[in-house]
Image (cartoon, grey):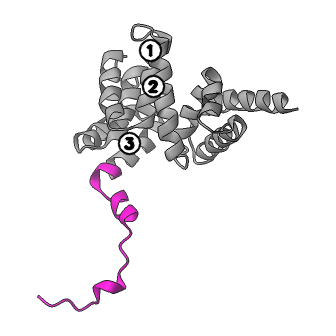
Amino acid sequence: MKNDYNEDEFNFDDEVYEELTQDKIYLNEGADAYQRGDYETAIRLYKKSADMGNITALSNLGYCYYYGRSIPVDKDKARECWEKAAILGDIAAVYKLGDMYRYGDLPQNLDFSHALYKRAFILATDNSENYYVAPDAFLRMLKYYPDDIAEMGYSKLTIALSCVTGIKKRIAEGDNYSAKVLADAKTVLLKLIDEQI
């Protein structure tokens, strides 16, 4: 069949096309429901998206299990979600597993926690424009292992500024869960500024 258009006239941007895939639609609708506090809808949509292979949805589902968002708290299921997502490179899943080892949800192991935080940090520096997860990875390293940041060739002050800026962006876009994280990031930033003076 002959087309009545010249294919070169259309510029198909892969990113725009990817955003329209069904797994991402479910993910975004689930995130919107989560922000509204409609956790049942969020869980249903995250499960659909995760079943289609979306690792962010799988990681987000871990949050629902961990915090008991309209379902009983199930830290084993949260860990399972985060382990699967972490293997595939999801930044939030990596640092949340680090939290589980740090705070004793899993047998406390600060070496594992440190390694996971460092891995999340490295992933975040490659995806620093993702202000929904990169700032949290940055903040963990700034709080617990700041010397590692300098050893990896990064400026602690620059990372802290990026952290605060990213968290402010997501709050401006309607994130209802980041006020405490922003306060922590500002405290770290002010401490670093004081050290420079």
Q: Residues within 10 Å of mark 1 (few under 14, many from 20)?
A: many
Residue at 45%, 25% in the rendered image: 116
Viewer-side label of 3, 1: 1
| Residue tagged 2 | 116
In screen coordinates, is 140 left or right of 74? right
| Residue tagged 1 | 101
Q: CA distance from mark 3 to mark 2?
A: 27 Å
Q: Amino acid at mark 1?
A: Tyr
Q: Secondary structure at mark 2?
A: helix
| Residue tagged 3 | 30
The image quadrant where one finds the N terminus is bottom left
Q: Which label was assigned to residue 51? A: none
Q: CA distance from mark 3 to mark 1?
A: 28 Å
Mark before the other along the chain sequence, 3 or 2? 3
Q: Mark 1 and mark 2 in contact (Cβ < 8 Å)?
A: yes
Q: Nearer the viewer, residue 157 or 85?
A: 157
The image quadrant where one finds the C terminus is top right
Looking at the rendering, the stretch of residues picked out in magenta corresponds to 1-24
Relative to 48, residue 111 above or below: above
Residue 138 is drawn in which quadrant? top right
Mark before the other along the chain sequence, 2 or 1? 1
Relative to 83, residue 154 above or below: below
In screen coordinates, is 37 left or right of 159? left
